[in-house]
Amino acid sequence: MSAFAHETRSRTEKYAGPIFTVYTDEVTMSGGGTADRDVVINKNAVGVVALDDVGRVVLIRQYRHPVGKQLWELPAGLRDVEGEDLAVTAGRELAEEADITARRFDLLVDLHTSPGFSAETIRIFLARDLSPVPEDERHDRKDEEADIEICWVDLDEAVAMVLRGEITNAAAVGGLLCAARARDDGWATLRPADTPPL
């Protein structure tokens, strides 16, 4: 059975901001006719499962205004430096949010974060061979990041937190479950950090 080729007939910009733009697209539908679909286009992101030599991962807890509460997450951030290698972006975010550097990055998983309305993707890396950022070189965190809580958790306990509903951030859920599966597979499913992005 062949898939219907959906076409965008028109695109109208509704909002443009520093992080994302919102459009309304007129799209052909499988049943005939067209429908309007709102679409968010943004800068995309990277995230990091940083795993130490005793099997712990670093989690951060920070306030997320749209949901009105603090969430457990992975160190992560926008791909906001044009042309920057994604593993370099991930390393920068890891240092800024968790005061950690890594000598090894492998690709765990690529995710579409909310494809019902957004084109956003996030690439989750596994970071190993970790070292602390010296105290005098640490990033000065501001705004929501000013009170980030940093916590080291055994990977299996982090997976249990997911299954208990204590970790609900989609990128963290995907990254932690993929890291546990990759570990159980002897890391055979990891891909090179420079694998072309989605």
Image (tube, helix red, strand yellow):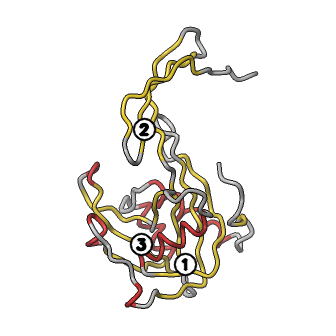
Three-letter amino acid code at the position of disc 1: Leu
Query: Badge 1 is on which residue?
Result: 51
Residue at mark 1 to residue at mark 2: CA–CA distance: 35 Å
Q: Position of residue 186 (x, y in %)?
A: 71, 74
Residue 44 higher or lower than 147, as above or below? above
Residue 195 higher or lower than 158, as above or below? above
**Which is more N-terminal, label 2 or label 1?**
2
Q: Is label 3 in a helix, a strand or a loop? A: strand
Query: Badge 3 is on which residue?
Result: 59
**Which is more N-terminal, label 1 or label 3?**
1
Position of residue 151 in the picture relative to residue 88 (left or right): left
Q: Is label 2 in a helix, a strand or a loop? A: strand
Position of residue 69 in the picture relative to residue 97 (left or right): left
Query: Does any portion of residue 197 appear in the rendered image?
Result: yes
Residue at mark 3 to residue at mark 1: CA–CA distance: 10 Å
Residue placed furthest toward the left = 68
Q: Position of residue 89 (x, y in %)?
A: 54, 66
Quarter of the image where one finds residue 184: bottom right
Position of residue 5 in the picture relative to residue 178 (left or right): right
Q: Position of residue 37 (x, y in %)?
A: 46, 24
Three-letter amino acid code at the position of disc 3: Leu
Marks 1 and 2: which is nearer the front? 2
Q: Residue at x 55, y 84 (%)?
A: 130
Residue 99 higher or lower than 162, as above or below? below
Quarter of the image where one finds residue 163: bottom left
